Amino acid sequence: MLVLGIETTCDETAASVVRRDADGKGTILSNVVLSQAAQHAAYGGVVPEIAARAHVEILDHVIAAAMVEAGLSFRWIDGVAAAAGPGLIGGVIVGLTTAKAIAMVAEKPLIAVNHLEAHALTPRLTHGTPFPYCLFLASGGHTQIIAVRGVGDYVRLGTTIDDAIGEAYDKTAKLLGLPYPGGPDVERRAERGRAARFSLPRPMLGRAEPDFSLSGLKTALRLEAERIAPLSETDVCDLCAAFQAAVVDIVVDRVKTGLARFAERFGRPTALVAAGGVASNKAVRAGLQHVADAAGVPMIAPPPALCTDNGAIIAWAGAERLALGLTDDLEVSPRARWPLEQLSPPPAPGGP
């Protein structure tokens, strides 16, 4: 099964072709990603109108490059998948409309993919991870702990009550005068800093519900930065280190609680999985590895290139759904918001 995947939910224009074999193994045949980071850098964040225009201008070329890299024409693919949300609605419309056009002209099935489900299913592409597993999904827009029980079958165990972790990283970078995108820059400077210099809070630690809160940490960091301003390079590195140390402590505590909640409700997970852009952070990965080791389960994190937005994870989610006969008609709508819990698992074999 060969599926073309299209991703346009934020500021990456991406397309990929993925093969799913009959035994469930996946192979990435192409994965072309064009970042718009340079176009948004002057604004310190993604400007939706600029992002949508850029998708319109370049998406056809990105898809063509992905097809050439895979050595295929549209007649050889078995389905066209596009991220139909959640995301910036202008970009989502561009990608989904393009996918509809290809599906209609090439007479191929259309699969409207939930972007979060694509992240949730990525470990099955990279590691063949069996269900059920516990997912820590952390990105610029989402921070959740999810029980992944099957394709379309997700139970949210915990979420953030304010900022997402990736958003907190980016806002920290902006506060400290670091360039966009800020998360990787904060991580690099944290490696050179002294975390113990500043005492920052760890919100929600020890709470019974595996939820997150980042706004208090972000405010505390701002107050420390204002107290010692103007900031030297050493100050910036130390603040980044203190911030990241607090984030890792929060993640370790909250995911440990989430794993316990998973075990109570669904039994032992096959793995602890990290996905989303924040999952590429080495310090966060190390903290999650500690949690997994203590729980006696494998810790799985896809390669960093598959943690950020890309077409391969969309294509794979499309292939997983297509293998179960889950397709969409051309009337399917793009969505700015689309919680995983709104997805439905396929009917049981022999069921109605």
Image (spheres, rainbow, N blue to C red):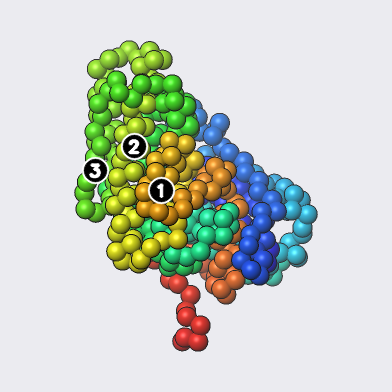
Which x, y percent locates residue 244?
Answer: 37, 32
What residue is rendered at 76% in x and 51% in y? 68
The quadrant the N terminus occupies is bottom right
Which is nearer the eye, 245 or 137?
245
Label 2 sits on what residue type?
Answer: Val
Vertical order, 3 against 174 (above or below): below
Q: Earlier in the sequence, mark 1 or mark 3?
A: 3
What residue is rendered at 43% in x and 55% in y? 297
Q: Total label count? A: 3
Identify the residue under disc 1.
Answer: 293
- In the picture provided, is 244 more to the left or to the right than 210? right
Identify the residue under disc 3.
Answer: 205
Q: Which mark is residue 247?
A: 2
Residue 344 quadrant: bottom left
Label 3 sits on what residue type?
Answer: Leu
Label 1 sits on what residue type?
Answer: Asp
Residue 245 quadrant: top left
Secondary structure at numbered mark 3 = loop
Residue 157 quadrant: bottom left
How many angstroms separate mark 1 from mark 2 (CA)? 19 Å
What residue is rendered at 48% in x and 75% in y? 346
Secondary structure at numbered mark 1 = helix
Which is nearer the eye, 348 or 43?
348
Vertical order, 184 against 140 (above or below): above
- In the picture provided, is 93 more to the left or to the right than 265? right
Neighbours of disc 2 within 10 Å: few (<14), some (14-19), many (20+): many
Asked whether disc 1 touches disc 2, contact meaning CB atoms under 8 Å apart, the reply is no
How many angstroms separate mark 1 from mark 3 (CA)? 20 Å
Instruction: Please indicate, yes or no, whether residue 324 appears anywhere in the rendered image.
Output: yes
Q: Earlier in the sequence, mark 3 or mark 2?
A: 3
Q: Earlier in the sequence, mark 1 or mark 2?
A: 2
How many angstroms separate mark 3 from mark 2 (CA)? 11 Å
